[in-house]
Image (spheres, rainbow, N blue to C red):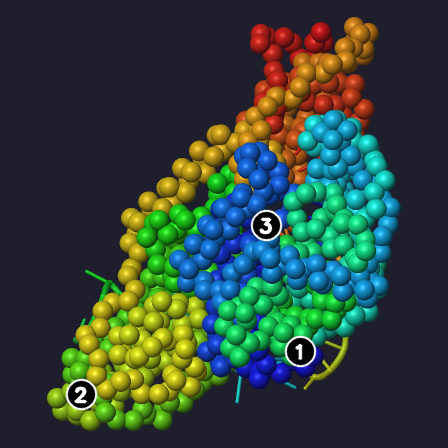
Amino acid sequence: MSNDDFPTDRPAVVTCGLPYANGDLHIGHLRGYIGADAFDRALETLGQETAYVCGSDMHGTPVAVNAEQEGVDPEAFALEWHRQYEETFPKFNVEFDNYGHTHDETNTELTQEIVRELDDQGYIYEKEIQVAYDPDADQYLPDRYVEGTCPYCGEKARGDECDEGCQRHLEPGEVEDPTSTITGNPAEYRERTHKFFEVSEFADFLTDFLDDLEGTSNARNQPRQWIEDGLQDWCITRDMDWGIDYPAADGEAESDLVLYVWVDAPVEYISSTKQYSERVGTDGYDWEQVWKDEGDVVHFIGRDIIQHHTIFWPAMLEGAGYNKPRGIAATGFITINGKGLSTSRNRAIWAKEYLEEGFHPDLLRYYLMTTGGLQQDVDFSWDAFQETVNGELVGTVGNFWYRSLLFAYRNYEGTPETDVSAEVHERIQDALADVRESVNDYSLRGVGQAAVQLAQFGNEYIQRHEPWKLTDDEPERARQVIRDCVQIAKAVGVLLEPIAPDKAQRLWAQLGEEGSVADARLEDALEAPPRTFDEPGELFEKIEDDRVAELNEKLDERVAAAAETESDDTDADETGDMTATDELEPLADERISFEDFQELDVRVGRIEAAEGIEGADDLARLEVDIGFETRQVVAGIKQLHDLEELPGEKCILLANMEPAELFGVESNGMILAAGEEADLLTTHGDAAVGEKVQ
RNA sequence: AGCGGGAUGGGAUAGCCAGGAGAUUCCGGCGGGCUCAUAACCCGCAGACCGGUGGUUCAAAUCCACCUCCCGCUACCA
């Protein structure tokens, strides 16, 4: 595929990563949907034929598990979220040409068709594997329903991934000593026939594919390592009820397997395009042309799902005879006030919350799109948000729009009747070129900046010529200056539309333009606005300081409140939901003998020194006086205690613990502490340092 | 520790892929201007040895090697 510049004479399709129908949306999600939306709008402005499609991701174990917990069936559960998403997107001016979901008929059929095709092409084979099975719950245990020991490194691992050790992706059946996460009981392995997709056959193809891939560099570079390390064939079926049935071949008995969620999820990109095509007719947009013949496919995704989109997905497309993506833009994460966004700690700006605060969506769009590069992590703070809005949108763009149009309205009742000057014409053309270049670099930041810098030029231009001084003595020159300014204002509107569609539309209307600015092309930025228009209004409002203070306070309070209730929910981040598990660890069944206890040499100690260990988040190096000697001990309490306050504190130390090395620091004993918060054990009275605890 | 990203004037950020004039823009500081405009806008000044060391080159913020530090995810929790 040749990568000639946008706009091409082929249809394009832009997608964003499917929202997983499992929880509320926050600005981290929004960044991707807004980015893809802005990119799609920018392509249209360049004159590219496009479709922007997406859908909700309905399948997979987390949906099944959470639905079960709420006592509803997975479909109803996922559909509820799906409806919420559908309602939310337009509120951020994210306008999909089609928004479907992975459980609908189109996707079910198309997924099965593609899998059948892969099968026909010989890329799918069957293999007997050992699948974990929970005899008590009488069910198989796919993916995260099971945990055990990693066969490669011996660390504790989840069913699908060695998350604590070597990070390796694990195939079903690989985990050793499996236990059921449902009942906590040991699981047994049963022989099951599963389907495998021969990803390993595609190594050469994928290497070439990555060479040509546009978008962000992380999407190109990260998977290379994977390919070099050797690709594993991919088990694409699961023992579950919730999902798309594995398609039965002719004459074969219906399979009771379901396709792995990552098989049917990306197919939704095609399905959603197909639905769009069916709605507008193939004359309006032909999905088969884009996906099977000639088209430009661009995916916007989060950087956490690069592998799926650069390995599995293109291999599937290649195997089934579809077009491969031209560009993949993998966006960075969002941080809040410099710290990682955490849904469990409620450190997030929720989509709903932003809207409830009454802020215009275009402000957030502009902020998210222009604050950093697409690939970069972007920090969000209300302070920075205010600064950007007040400085660039209110001060530069809004002010220029308002002063130009107001001056034009008062003196000429609209656009002065004369031609745009050569200087301004040229300056606008430069801006158009910037936008063209930015889009081809996948730089939404560049698009936004081209618009704002043009407005900045406008402010400078009007200032330089001071038309307010010219109206009386040199009316012709004043007329010229304002004519130029009105044109710049219009151009800024056209250029800003991808980022701030609603604000651009309002400007469009103020200029007396017919129709939608979304339909405007770059060249329209140079067309004269209507001769007359009405008195303009202010399009952007300043955000006041006390408002920001209030918002900061709210956020802080909320994070603090969440921290209090959090206490034990260790894995709340897993699903992004607050599934607090405040159960206590069950009491041990087995009793030990007094002799066993006597083997523990537990002593009273006094902490002499405490310091954090570099590179470790939680570990601290302690020096503990236990009478006979001072021991160096490593303890996981760094974040839970103010280390400076620890020296002098008494503690209880297991003295005959075998030494271990953590982060290169020897630990010679074990400090006793209670619970997740590592509440430090100490003595009630005044026991002397070194005394034995018994 | 594994993977990824980063280090550029006081703060934030661009430029790096395709090496070459005074290193971008925003905020802040200082001084001035304007009064059409949302106390907005415009101009000027101060402020950066582009994380460190070495290398390639006529030329390096940009390419290569090594190092230090930071952030995120995953981990470490004796």
Mark 1 Cα shell of 10 Å, populated few (<14), some (14-19), many (≥20): few
Q: Which mark is residue A578?
A: none
Please give the residue where the numbered disc 1 appears in the rendered image.
A293
Question: In terms of sequence position, does the residue under pointer 2 or pointer 3 come before the other?
Answer: 3
- Relative placement, left or right, of A6 versus A353 is right
In front: label 1 or label 2: 1
Q: Helix, strand or loop at disc 1?
A: helix
Give the mark count: 3
Q: Which mark is residue A58?
A: 3
User: What's under tag 2, amino acid-wise?
Assistant: Leu
Say which residue appears at 65% left-offset and 9% top-offset.
A688
Say which residue appears at 83% left-offset and 46% top-offset.
A193
Q: Same chain for the residues at labels 1 and 2, yes or no?
A: yes
Q: Residue A432: x percent and y percent?
A: 45, 82
Q: Nearer the viewer, residue A147 or A675?
A: A147
Please give the residue where the numbered disc 2 appears in the rendered image.
A470
* Residue A240 sits above or below residue A641 on the image: below
Mark 3 Cα shell of 10 Å, populated few (<14), some (14-19), many (≥20): many
Distance of mark 1 from mark 3, alpha carbons? 29 Å
What chain does mark 1 sit on? A
Q: Same chain for the residues at labels 1 and 3, yes or no?
A: yes
Q: Quadrant of the N terminus of chain A?
A: bottom right
What chain does mark 3 sit on? A
In front: label 2 or label 3: 3
Can residue A333 be spotted in the picture?
no
